[in-house]
Image (cartoon, rainbow, N blue to C red):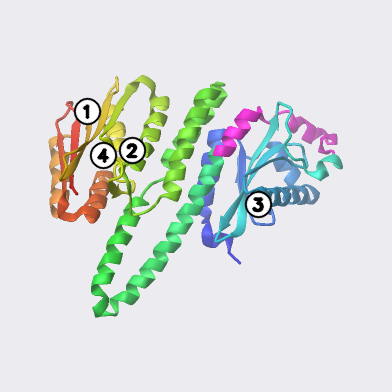
Amino acid sequence: MINFRDIITETFQNEIQHSFSLATGFGVVFTDAEGRHIGSGANFCKFCEKLNETPEGAQCCTLSNKHAIEIALKTNKPCVYICHAGLVNIEIPLIYNNQCFGAITAGQVVCTEPNDYPKDVANEKLNWLKDPELNEYYNDIIKMDCRQIEAATTAFSAITNYIIQSVAYTNVKEKLAKQTEELLKAENKRIQLEKQLNMAQLDALQKQVTPHFIFNVINSVSRLLSLKEYDTAEEMLNSFAQMMRYSLTDAKSSVPLIQELNYIRNYLAIQSIRFGDRIHYKIACDESLHNEYIPFFSLQPLIENSIEHGLLNKTSGGNLLLSCRDFSTHFIITIQDDGIGIDTKSLDFLTNQFQLDEKKGTEHVGLYNCYKRLQLMFGDKLTFHIESKEQNGTIITIQLFK
């Protein structure tokens, strides 16, 4: 039996609940596999708070959650349903090693359109609105149409996948640490140990991705939905879903270049929606390089760095060019922007990091991590160069021998 707290820490639970409720306006709470609330949740509407104060109301909520978990497990997708009190909720099971150890419940909204969402049978037997206070609170509940609810379901499902992926990585890392300790005891396995440590270091670097981008996307989608810009919200969600599928299913030590470029295209599509005319970009790649392998997630952080620290710090934004050129014996990847550039002191610091192969502090950690991923895979077949001047943009040139 998997223990919920062995998988989801209280701090991480509170962060997810708060971030998603803030972005969508939904009430959010984690439950165990039986539908019982774990903690107090976030952004509960007054109607649900009052209802859960009564033993009968709390029990009905638990049974509704459990029923929705069963539907989601049976259909293998998130369950959008009408709870016993007539509110729309989204139930997403948390599954690890083929075992459901809990779920995330989000919603507490009223749907403004006819729908075929499954209803809790208790909804037909109980009428909470007979209570004057509950009836008053019910009128204040957030109202959404089906498209808003389904868009939120897509985004929240991606968050859930992120949680499970994070858990899986942590467990793998712990197992790897134990294996490494055992290998250290055997001198004759030193070469094998060195290889495993390099792979572990590469994997750790690949996983140094915070959820802040995910929450930024959710906030943007929520804003678009509130403005009823459904097509743009759908476009952003599609790009986001493709990014999540790539990061969750292709987290290998190396991937074809074309896959990394497709990931970057989706990332840039999202940023273009968020920032409009402030970002202009172009991706050009020789077709002969599509199946050349590079480390997973080794280019996107460089693109993100160019946007966040280069283009967006200019009032008018700017341009970004990513090019991949084949020269038979080697290929060159160039990332060029016309942003604010890097000051001389910071550039010297970065160059020193690369020469010493040593990460110092937290400044420019993204650039160093990308360099390190490439260096672990290509070794002395890599040349990594940064050229930049303040207010004149930055050029990163990566030369890789085949």
Q: Within 10 Å of the Cα at label 2, are there few (<14), some (14-19), or many (20+) other Cα atoms?
A: many
Question: What is the CA distance from the residue labelled 2 to the residue labelled 4?
Answer: 14 Å
Question: What is the CA distance from the residue labelled 3 to the residue labelled 2?
Answer: 34 Å
Give, as a three-letter code, the residue at label 3.
Leu
Q: Residue 73, labelled with which disc?
A: 3
Contact? badges 4 and 3 (CB < 8 Å): no
Circle 2 sits on which residue? 261
Which residue is at the front of the view, 349 or 152?
A: 152
Mark 2 or 4: in front is 4
Circle 1 sits on which residue? 340
Mainly helix, strand or loop, the magenta region?
helix
Give, as a three-letter code, the residue at label 2.
Leu
Question: What is the CA distance from the residue labelled 4 to the residue labelled 1?
Answer: 33 Å
Q: Is residue 156 visible?
A: yes
Quadrant assignment for the N terminus: bottom right
Contact? badges 3 and 2 (CB < 8 Å): no
Mark 4 or 1: in front is 4
Q: Which residues are magenta?
A: 127-154
Mark 3 or 2: in front is 2
Q: Within 10 Å of the Cα at label 1, are there few (<14), some (14-19), or many (20+) other Cα atoms?
A: many
How far from the left and from the top, in percent, is residue 228? Answer: 57, 21
Q: Which numbered disc, 1 or 3, marks the residue that appears first in the sequence? A: 3
201 above or below 324?
below
Circle 4 sits on which residue? 288
Taking the image as shown, residue 174 lies to the left or right of residue 340, namely: right
Mark 1 or 2: in front is 2
Q: Is residue 25 visible?
A: no
Q: Which numbered disc, 1 or 2, marks the residue that appears first in the sequence? A: 2
How far from the left and from the top, in percent, is residue 199? Answer: 31, 60
Q: Which numbered disc, 4 or 3, marks the residue that appears first in the sequence? A: 3
- Disc 1 is placed on an element classified as loop
